[in-house]
Amino acid sequence: MVAHQAQELDMKGHTTEIKLFNTLSGKKEAFKPLRAGHVGMYHCGPTVYDDAHIGNLRSYVFADILRRTFEYNGYSIDQIVNITDVGHLTSDADEGEDKMTKALKRLGKPLTLDAMRETASVYEDHFKEDLVLLDIETPSAFPRASDHIKDDIELIHTLEKNGYAYKISRGVCFDTSKFGTYGKLGNIKLDSLKDGARVSTDPEKRNQTDFWLWKFDDNLGWDSPWGRGFPGWHIECSAMSRKYLGQPFDIHTGGIDHIPVHHNNEIAQSEAAYGVPLARYWIHNAFLTMNRSKMAKSAGGFVTLKTLVTNDLSPLAYRYWLLTGHYRSPMDFSYEAIKAAQNAYKRLQEAMAGYPEGGKVDAGFVGRFKALINDDLDTPKALALAWELIKDAGVDDADKRATLLDFDRVFGLKLGSLPCPTDEVIPDNVRALADEREQARQAKDWKKADKLRGEIERLGYELRDAAGGAAIKKKV
C-alpha cells in the first residue's frame, strides 16, 4: 500500500483514512482524491483593499493545517490562493461600491486601474508577510483577479451561449432560476436570499437571487463584448480555480460566510458553463468573533497581527490558540486568551529546548496523532496529545523531541527552530550539587531539593527535570 490509499493501516493498526466535513453533503466523508496521491485545493483569498484582520487569517491557518495534514499523509499538493484586486463589492451579495474603489477614495488616490493595482500590491505584500509570520506554507500560486479578465470574459461567453446570462442596464446577470439546484451548498433556502437578505434589489433582475457576471462602469474597467466595466467577484474565482486546477478539482475552502452567496454562485456558474462539478469537497471554517460578534472591517476596531505584536503577543501564539479550537467551532478572541496561549506555547518551547537530538519517533504516539488529525483535523485533541507525550516519563527525551517535531509537520509552530541542548562542560561542583539534589528528590526531601536547586542557580546554571534525571544548562 502507498500513503495516499484511503484504508492504509499504520504499524499500530490505526487507520490513516482522512475524513472531512463536506458542506456539500452536510456530513463527514472519507476523502478520495481525483488523482491518486495528489490534492488540488482552492482557497478564496483576500480582497486587498486593507490589511487582513486576525479573523480573516483564521481561514488561512485552517487551510494550512488542511494542506499539512495531506502532506503528512504523503500527498502532493497544488494549492491556489487568489488575490482579489477588483470586482468585490462592499456587500458579498453583489451590491454597493467596489471595495478597491472604496480604498482609493479612502487613501486619496485617483480612480484609475494603475492606482488600484498599486494599492492592491501594498496590501497583498502585507498579507504575504502575515502568512510568513504565521508559518503558513506558500501556495503554488497567488493569481490576481485583474490578470484574468480574458478568462472571465470567456466564461461569461459560455454562460451566455448556454442560456444562463442576460444583459440589463447595469450589467450582465446570471439567471439563477435556470439552475435547478441553486443553493444546494449548505442547503440554503432561497427565501433567505431574496428581498431583505440583499442590501438592495434591482427591478430589472429576473430573480433577486441573480448575480452579476459583469458590472458596467464607463469610467473604470476593461472593454468587453457587453460594455466597459469589470467582472463580478464570483466569476473571478470560477475562472481562476478552473484555469489553475482544472474542473472538477478536489477541495474548495473558505469561511462559512461564503456559503450562502459566493460559493453557491461559484457552483452555479461553473456547473452551468461546463456541466461538471466545480469541486468535490467544500470545507468551511467558522467565524472568529470578538465580544461574541463577527470580527469585520466594516464594524471597525478589528485586530491585525501587527496589533498583536504591538501588544507583545507572538503571531505563533495566535496560531497555537487557533489549534486549541476545532476549525468548525466559533472562537471568541480576547487578549487574555492569546496571552494564555502564549504562555502555553512558551512552556512547549521550553520543553523542546531541554530535549536532545538523536531520538526516534514514538510509533504509538504518532499513530494516535495521525488518527486524530485525520478525523476532520481534530487539532485540540492532537495538541492535548502533545502535552500527554511531554508528561510521559516512559518516553525517552530524545524520542519526545523527534515525535514532537513529527507532530509539528502539521502544527506549524516552528518547534524545529529551537536550539538543542549542547554538550557544554559543567563544573564538577555544579554536577555534585545536581547529583545531591537528585538523591534528595528520590528520597522525596523536597525542601532540600529546592535549596540545592537555588544554590545551582546562584552559580549561574539551571536545571530542567526530565525522565532519567535533570539536565543542567548554563543560564543565558
Image (spheres, rainbow, N blue to C red):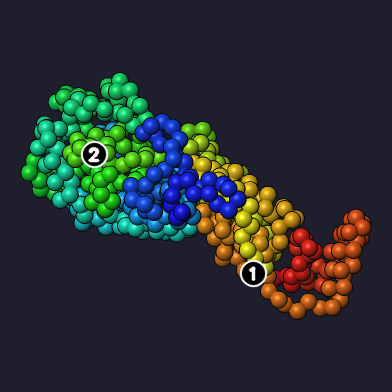
Q: Which residue is mark 2?
A: 276
Q: In this orientation, which residue lies closer to the viewer: 57 or 419?
A: 419
Q: Is residue 242 above or below residue 186?
A: below
Find residue 430 and report its image quarter: bottom right
Question: Residue drawn at (7%, 44%), measured in percent from left and top?
Answer: 225
| Horizontal and vertical percent position of residue 363 | 62, 55
Residue 243 image offset from top left, x and y in percent: 23, 51
Observer able to see residue 317 = no
Task: Give the residue displayed 20% in from the left and 52% down from the top.
Answer: 148
Secondary structure category for the residue under label 1: loop
Residue 63 shows in the view: yes
Q: Amino acid at mark 2?
A: Val
Q: Horizontal placement of 47 versus 295: left or right?
A: left
Left or right: residue 432 compared with residue 113: right
Give the image quarter of residue 265. top left
Residue at the left extreme?
Answer: 225
Q: Which residue is mark 1?
A: 358
Q: CA distance from mark 2 to mark 1?
A: 51 Å
| Name of the residue lying farthest toward the front | 1
Tell me if mark 2 has few (under 14), some (14-19) or many (20+) residues whose alpha carbon lies within 10 angstroms of its own.
Answer: few
Q: Earlier in the sequence, mark 2 or mark 1?
A: 2
Is residue 100 left or right of 414 when viewed as pictured? left
32 or 438: nearer the viewer: 32
Q: Amino acid at mark 1?
A: Gly
Q: Quadrant of the image for the C terminus? A: bottom right
Q: Secondary structure at mark 2?
A: loop
User: Measured from the top left, where is residue 213 in percent x and y?
Assistant: 18, 38
Q: Residue at x 68, y 70 (%)?
A: 421
User: How many numbered callouts?
Assistant: 2
Residue at (35, 37) in percent of width and height? 258
Relative height, residue 372 to residue 165 (above, below) = below
